[in-house]
Image (spheres, helix red, strand yellow):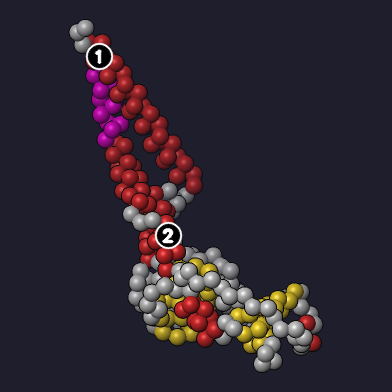
Amino acid sequence: MTWRKVWTWHLWLGVGLVLPLVWWLSTAIVFILWPMDVVQGRHLATAEATKTEPLPPGLQLPASLVDGSRSLNIQRVAGHIVAIAHRPEGAQMWDLEQGVNMGSVIPLAWAEQAARRGFKGPFEVEAVYLFGPDGIGNKLSGVGPEALAPPGEFPGPFPSYAFHLSKGPSTHFYVNALNGEALQRRTGIWRAYDLAFRLHSLDFVWEGARRALMGVVGLGGLLAGLSGALMAWKRLRKRPA
């Protein structure tokens, strides 16, 4: 009678473990479908190296740019010599060649030039957003909502331009709005990978409930393994020598 109870418990433990095992295995399969270079869009990056050119001597900085700045960077952006002044109220951009105050970000045309140079394949823009220092995105052109919440797929830095491409794997290409640096190429594959990871790790479940559930499943698996080992040991003992 005791061994029958062990068999019954083993059976029901196995039935109870089917759902979490199917859940974790089915979500884990997504992790092996694509190489990480494809998942993270690195295959869409060009191999073109950024050219560095010395700044011309004798650059003149406007006094209004220097006064009140915490720090000041001078660099080439899309072929232009730009000064970036970091102030308490935010960044201020200055085109030193033209002597023009450009505001808080580089022009969209400069950012798009850098994006096209750093992207491999068709660059067909569906929409362009500018995410400000607060992470809120405002549509500049194209089709889509007029405003977007801070993107969960992209942690920053901000401000940044986002180019939503209509072709390829639903790519969102983020470009630094201060220096034109390519930041991330977020693809639909990457978003599917992130979703599978959240499902696999039960990230959407409250932490206490998640820990309890994983503990129950772990204990159930341990008991199922022990009961199976006991039944196997009993059967082997009965086998004639």
Q: Which residue is mark 2?
A: 37
Residue at the spot 53% in from the left edge and 74% down from the top edge: 175
For the magenta stretch, what is the residue range?
Answer: 1-15
Nearer to me, 130 or 33: 33
Taking 237 as reference, is 57 left or right? right
Q: Can you say whether 185 is above or below 82 in the image?
A: above
Q: Pointer 2: residues within 10 angstroms few (<14), some, or many (20+)?
A: few
Q: Between 8 and 198, which is closer to the camera in this rendering?
A: 198
Amino acid type at mark 1: Leu
Which residue is found at the position 73% from the left and 76% from the top?
Answer: 72
| SS for callout 2 | helix
Judge whether 35 appears above or below 65 on screen.
Answer: above
Q: How many marks?
A: 2
Label 1 element class: helix
Q: Residue at x 76, y 74 (%)?
A: 70
> What crowding class fits label 1: few (fewer than 14 Cα within 10 Å), some (14-19), or many (20 or more)?
few
Of circles 1 and 2, the one toward us is 2
Q: Is residue 138 visible?
A: no
Q: Which mark is residue 236?
A: 1
- Residue 197 % position (x, y): 41, 53
Q: Residue at position x 33%, y 45% from top? A: 25
